[in-house]
């Protein structure tokens, strides 16, 4: 594929998104921006959330990671499904009962204002870092295959991308994103299946040949049975369970889409449908990774970074159709994760940190505050993308989950204590607890590695949450009997 063709696809796809934005963002109120007026069809939300959850990380890092870690990611996906059941049956009823716009309002009601602010601050940190890592991955691809050939530096490529995201989410917010996510999910899933077909054809296999070759390939190993390994299957399952509870159920970005459904029952149907589709699609991403690995071995293709395996093969070795569908898929993944994240952090900052709903401002004042926040968050995303370009030294999917383990852990501990106990906690201690817990987690990880050669995987999230839970136990108020 030529840079000119890739540029044309990029521009055409962006124009389509802006058309959808124009149609959904007309006469949008604050309620439309934050909650979609609670009129989003559940099946549209479910389908669109698939693209938002997969993101550019799944689209590129999961297939590439198969080179190093086989199908060891699959037990974690099974844990995801179990986690979605918990979100649907435990968390969603609480959020709907309290009629929340920001889910961190629960912490204010349960523990107090400082707990509320601490939870919101951790979400902003978590989502900001995670979302910009995902955006960085996609901007890197666009820069490598499009902008670099035009003499455009990385920082300018990142600026262009952020301005486009800013443009089509500025007015409609979640009401726009529900529909753009649907479009983006369709393109992303089509890209995966077409890529599988193109590699199968390039290898001279029939469909049944492909199934057999993947099945007997060493890449298809699923169960790591070494308890000391960070990819031990039991660790993976538990990590998937708690990652989902934290990164979906305690994440304003994902829950904001659910809370735009008409009622609790429809939101739960959305969650169950979404989890089933996501399980199937993650399996096909792993199949794609095995095929990419076998193709690379057959052709003698070497990549320094596994995240670059998919784009290298699709654009540099397969047919133009494969390259075209890859570009469309990665654009879909990028826009889908970036637009929701920008809207969610804007929502959380204006409502949780600035307290726009508590101030009693007129509609015009609230809208102005939202616009300014939206712009500031876009600038913050741009700065972080540029910083990650300087620092990247690992597979992005591992970086995302490492960050999540340290930043979503305190949220997991806070909500677990709120839901599972009747403790009344000294609210002033909470900011200290949620800072100390990740620090202690880091120390424990280093000690276990040096003393017992035990490597923590994604279960680090659980350790962090348990330390926060313990801190809240110690800070609880004693009641006289």
Image (spheres, helix red, strand yellow):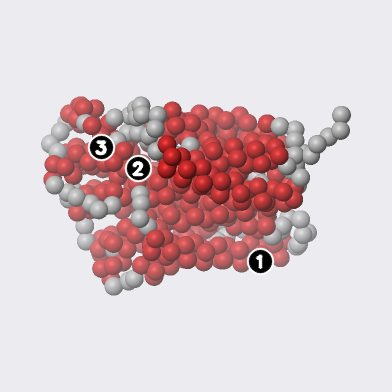
Mark on residue 290? 3
Residue 346, position as x, y percentages in the image: 59, 57
Q: Which is more N-terminal, label 3 or label 2?
A: 2
Tell me the CA gap for discs 1 and 2. 40 Å
From mark 1 to mark 3, how far is it between C-alphas? 50 Å
Give whichever of discs 1 and 3 has the lower sequence position: 3
Question: Which residue does the image show at 50% across and 29% down from the upper left?
Answer: 82
Q: Earlier in the sequence, mark 1 or mark 2?
A: 2
User: Which percent across, then down, holds residue 22?
Assistant: 51, 58
Dot 2 and dot 3 residues touching (CB under 8 Å): no
Q: What SS does tag 2 mark?
A: helix
Give the labeled residue for mark 1. Answer: 368
Report the residue at 29% width, 30% height from top.
Answer: 221
- Looking at the rendered image, the quarter that the N terminus falls into is bottom left
Crowding near the residue tagged with mark 1, few <14, some 14–19, many ≥20 C-alpha atoms within 10 Å: few
Residue most toward the right?
Answer: 481
What percent of the width, then of the height, locates residue 96?
68, 38
364 in relation to 310, above or below: below
Tell me if residue 262 comes above or below residue 126 in the rendering: above
Quadrant position of residue 136: bottom left
Which residue was labeled with disc 2? 62
Image-based side of 113 in relation to 8, left or right: right
Q: Is residue 427 visible?
A: yes
How packed mark 3 is, by other alpha carbons closer than 10 Å (few <14, some 14-19, many 20 or more), is many
């Amino acid at each position: 594929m030529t840079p000119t063709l890739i540029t044309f696809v990029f521009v055409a796809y962006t124009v389509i998104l802006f058309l959808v934005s124009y149609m959904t963002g007309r006469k949008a109120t604050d309620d439309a921006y934050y909650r979609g007026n609670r009129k989003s069809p559940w099946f549209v939300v479910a389908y669109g959330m698939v693209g938002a959850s997969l993101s550019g990380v799944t689209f590129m890092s999961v297939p590439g990671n198969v080179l190093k870690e086989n199908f060891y990611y699959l037990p974690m996906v099974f844990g995801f499904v179990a986690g979605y059941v918990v979100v649907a049956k435990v968390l969603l009823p609480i959020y709907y009962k309290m009629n929340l716009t920001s889910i961190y309002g629960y912490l204010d009601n349960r523990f107090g204002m400082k707990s509320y602010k601490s939870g919101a601050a951790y979400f902003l940190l978590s989502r900001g870092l995670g979302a910009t890592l995902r955006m960085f991955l996609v901007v890197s691809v666009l820069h490598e295959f499009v902008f670099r050939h035009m003499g455009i530096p990385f920082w300018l490529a990142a600026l262009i991308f952020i301005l486009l995201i800013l443009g089509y989410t500025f007015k409609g917010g979640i009401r726009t994103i529900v529909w753009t996510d649907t479009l983006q999910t369709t393109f992303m899933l089509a890209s995966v299946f077409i890529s599988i077909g193109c590699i199968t054809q390039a290898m001279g296999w029939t469909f049944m040949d492909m199934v057999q070759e993947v099945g007997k390939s060493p890449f298809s190993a699923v169960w790591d049975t070494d308890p000391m390994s960070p990819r031990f299957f039991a660790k993976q399952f538990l990590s998937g369970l708690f990652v989902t509870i934290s990164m979906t159920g305690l994440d304003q970005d994902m829950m904001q889409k659910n809370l735009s459904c008409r009622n609790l029952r429809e939101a739960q149907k959305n969650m169950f449908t979404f989890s089933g589709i996501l399980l199937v699609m993650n399996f096909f991403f792993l199949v794609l990774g095995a095929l990419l690995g076998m193709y690379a071995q057959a052709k003698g293709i070497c990549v320094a970074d596994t995240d670059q395996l998919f784009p290298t093969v699709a654009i540099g070795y397969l047919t133009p159709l494969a390259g075209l569908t890859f570009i469309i898929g990665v654009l879909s993944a990028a826009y889908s994760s970036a637009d929701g994240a920008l809207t969610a952090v804007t929502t959380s900052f204006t409502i949780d940190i600035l307290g726009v709903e508590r101030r009693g401002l007129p509609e015009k004042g609230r809208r102005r505050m939202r616009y300014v926040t939206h712009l500031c968050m876009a600038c913050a995303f741009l700065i972080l993308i540029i910083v990650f370009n300087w620092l990247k030294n690992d597979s992005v999917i591992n970086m995302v989950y490492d960050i999540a383990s340290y930043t979503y852990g305190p949220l997991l501990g806070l909500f677990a204590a709120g839901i599972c106990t009747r403790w009344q906690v000294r609210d002033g201690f909470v900011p200290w607890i949620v800072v100390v817990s990740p620090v202690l987690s880091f120390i424990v990880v280093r000690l276990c590695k040096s003393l017992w050669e035990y490597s923590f995987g994604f279960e680090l999230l659980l350790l962090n949450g348990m330390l926060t839970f313990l801190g809240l136990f110690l800070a609880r108020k004693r009641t006289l009997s």
